[in-house]
Image (cartoon, rainbow, N blue to C red):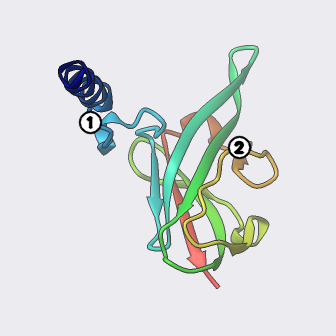
């Protein structure tokens, strides 16, 4: 009887070790971050970022940057978010108003789970919209 229990215990432990694998992700493995979206912040990190272009009749009419944050400050934080839209030569085309996106009481270790057009999307539709190549999201604590 003891032999059967030992064999079963070894089997269960071996199976558990095989199923565990490596769980750590590096930045290059994270497919949730668009390479054309950069973050400037010391209190949050990006867990999701996407830059998309809306086209109508062959013309670019809008560029959207979507984002989700994780609080890395170690405390509850209040902050504003703005986005700077750049062309390929790194010329600033547009900067959004930071007062438009205000987060209050963003809890310690909180990670956003879903994109909301009201809070997690900044869009640009003006002059030069067709030249937008990359975006910098700027987070400022208040």
Q: How far apart are marks 1 and 2 (CA)?
A: 28 Å
**Residue 6, how many percent across, how many down?**
20, 26
Q: What element carries label 2?
A: loop
Q: Do the residues labelled 1 and 2 touch (CB within 8 Å)?
A: no
Q: In which quarter of the image is residue 20?
A: top left
Residue shown at the point (48%, 36%) measured from the top left = 32
Residue shown at the point (20%, 20%) measured from the top left = 7
> Residue 85 versus residue 31: which sits nearer the camera?
31
Q: Determine the residue located farthest toward the right in the rendered image.
A: 118
124 above or below 74?
Answer: above
Q: Determine the residue located farthest toward the top in the rendered image.
A: 57
Please name which of the two marks, 1 or 2, marks the residue nearer to the observer: 1
**Residue 128, how many percent across, how many down?**
62, 42
4 horizontally vs 96: left or right: left
Name the residue carrying label 2.
115
Q: What element carries label 1?
A: loop
88 above or below 137?
Answer: above
Residue shown at the point (63%, 63%) measured from the top left = 82
39 horizontally vs 63: left or right: left
Residue shown at the point (64%, 53%) measured from the top left = 112
Q: In which quarter of the image is the C terminus?
A: bottom right
71 above or below 62?
Answer: below
**Residue 70, how many percent across, how many down?**
54, 59
Q: Residues within 10 Å of mark 1 (few under 14, many from 20)?
A: few
Name the residue carrying label 1.
22
């Amino acid at each position: 009887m003891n032999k059967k229990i030992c064999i079963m215990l070894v089997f269960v432990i071996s199976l558990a070790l095989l199923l565990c694998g490596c769980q750590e992700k590096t930045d290059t493995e994270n497919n949730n971050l668009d390479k054309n979206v950069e973050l400037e912040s010391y209190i949050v990190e990006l867990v999701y970022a996407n830059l998309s272009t809306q086209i109508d009749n062959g013309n670019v009419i809008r560029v959207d940057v979507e984002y989700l944050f994780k609080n890395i400050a170690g405390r509850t934080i209040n902050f504003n978010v703005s986005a700077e839209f750049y062309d390929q030569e790194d010329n600033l085309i547009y900067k959004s108003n930071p007062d438009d996106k205000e987060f209050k009481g963003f809890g310690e270790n909180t990670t956003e789970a879903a994109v909301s057009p009201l809070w997690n999307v900044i869009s640009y539709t003006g002059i030069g919209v067709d030249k937008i190549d990359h975006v910098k999201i700027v987070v400022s604590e208040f």
